């Protein structure tokens, strides 16, 4: 059995983020300096970007690339596989578009280190101040679908800011490539009796991040995927 080192990997899935990726990485690195007693690495998973995302990312972080765009689920899967292969004890995923405050990332890390929790979700809906009404409504619908079909109750099933213990890194295998991977992670964590927790985080929405977010079509795909996963379970 490979020895798991006491180190943390911060995973940033990115697709065509040249306008914001450098600032996002600089802010993350600023917060990393506050993390004590654990080695922390920063990894950008460049998901087949056609702009300068890869070049800019390599200035500030480790970087792996997909040859073509595969989707946020696939990029997250690549990041978690990297964490597993390189023996990280913890992993954090955070969006590249600036939607999450790196300061909130520290809440996730502290929760992982100080508790027995396996999957820690940064919830924008515990306090939804600053979150657009249509996003609140859409997320609540998906939360309801996740609860009814998969039997898992969370307040923000679509959050991209998550923390994974080593047990979660080893156990959760993402199969879906698109946005539906968020529900898949929660479902598989519950199915494998992992301990799921949520911490409140701030919702940051700029015109840029809103344009990059999920559409109604993506929401329908997520619902379809949840239904398919439930059928497979039966």
Image (cartoon, helix red, strand yellow):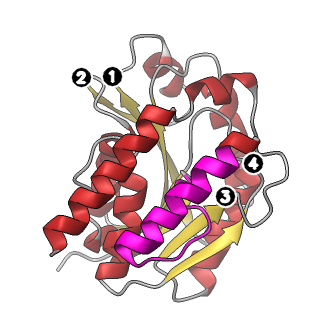
Q: Circles 2 and 1: CB distance less than 8 Å? A: yes
User: What is the spatial separation of the Cα atoms under label 2 and label 3, in whole angstroms?
Assistant: 29 Å
Residue bearing mark 3:
105
Residue interval drawn in magenta: 135-159
Give how far across and how far down residue 95 sits, in percent.
56, 42
Which quadrant is the N terminus positioned in?
A: bottom left
- Mark 1 to mark 3 CA distance (whole Å): 25 Å
Task: Give the Cα separation between the discs numbered 4 and 1.
Answer: 27 Å
Between 96 and 55, the one lying in front of the other is 96
- Classified by dominant secondary structure, the portion drawn in magenta counts as helix
- Going from N to C along the chain, the mark reached first, 4 or 3, is 3
Query: In the current view of this chain or complex, which residue is farthest to the top?
Result: 51
Q: Position of residue 170 (x, y in %)?
A: 27, 72
**Mark 3 or mark 1, which is nearer the start of the sequence?**
1
Judging by the rendered image, the residue that carries numbered circle 4 is 203
Label 1 near label 4: C-beta < 8 Å?
A: no
Rendered view: 3 above or below 95: below
Mark 4 or 1: in front is 4
**Image: 169 above or below 103:** below
Location of residue 220 by image quarter: top left
> Which quadrant, please, contains the C terminus?
bottom left
Mark earlier in primary sequence (2, 1): 1
Of callouts 4 and 2, the N-terminal one: 2
Distance from the alpha carbon under mark 4 to that under mark 2:
31 Å
Q: Residues within 10 Å of mark 1 (few under 14, many from 20)?
A: many
- The secondary structure type at the circle numbered 3 is helix
As helix, strand or loop, the secondary structure at mark 2 comes to: loop
Q: Which residue is mark 2?
A: 67
- Residue at image position (29%, 82%) is 192
Q: SS of the residue at dot 4? A: loop
Q: Which residue is mark 1?
A: 48
Spatial distance from mark 2 to mark 1, Cα to Cα? Answer: 5 Å
């Amino acid at each position: 059995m490979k020895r798991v080192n006491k180190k943390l990997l911060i995973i940033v899935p990115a697709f065509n983020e040249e306008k914001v990726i450098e600032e996002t990485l600089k802010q993350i690195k600023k917060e990393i300096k506050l993390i004590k007693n654990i080695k922390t690495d920063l990894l950008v998973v460049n998901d087949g970007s056609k702009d300068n995302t890869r070049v800019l990312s390599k200035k500030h972080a480790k970087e792996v690339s997909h040859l073509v765009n595969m989707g946020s689920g696939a990029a997250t899967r690549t990041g978690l596989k990297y964490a597993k292969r390189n023996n990280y004890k913890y992993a954090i995923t955070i969006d590249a578009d600036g939607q999450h405050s790196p300061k909130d990332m520290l809440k996730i890390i502290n929760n992982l280190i100080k508790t027995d929790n396996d999957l820690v979700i940064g919830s924008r809906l515990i306090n939804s101040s600053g979150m657009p009404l249509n996003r609140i409504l859409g997320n609540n619908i998906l939360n309801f679908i996740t609860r009814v079909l998969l039997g898992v109750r969370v307040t923000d099933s679509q959050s991209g800011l998550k923390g994974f213990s080593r047990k979660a890194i080893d156990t959760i295998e993402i199969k879906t490539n698109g946005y539906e991977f968020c529900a898949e992670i929660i479902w598989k964590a519950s199915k494998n009796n992992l301990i799921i927790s949520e911490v409140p985080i701030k919702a940051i929405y700029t015109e840029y991040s809103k344009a990059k977010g999920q559409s109604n079509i993506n929401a329908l795909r997520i619902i379809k995927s949840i239904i398919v996963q439930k059928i497979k379970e039966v």
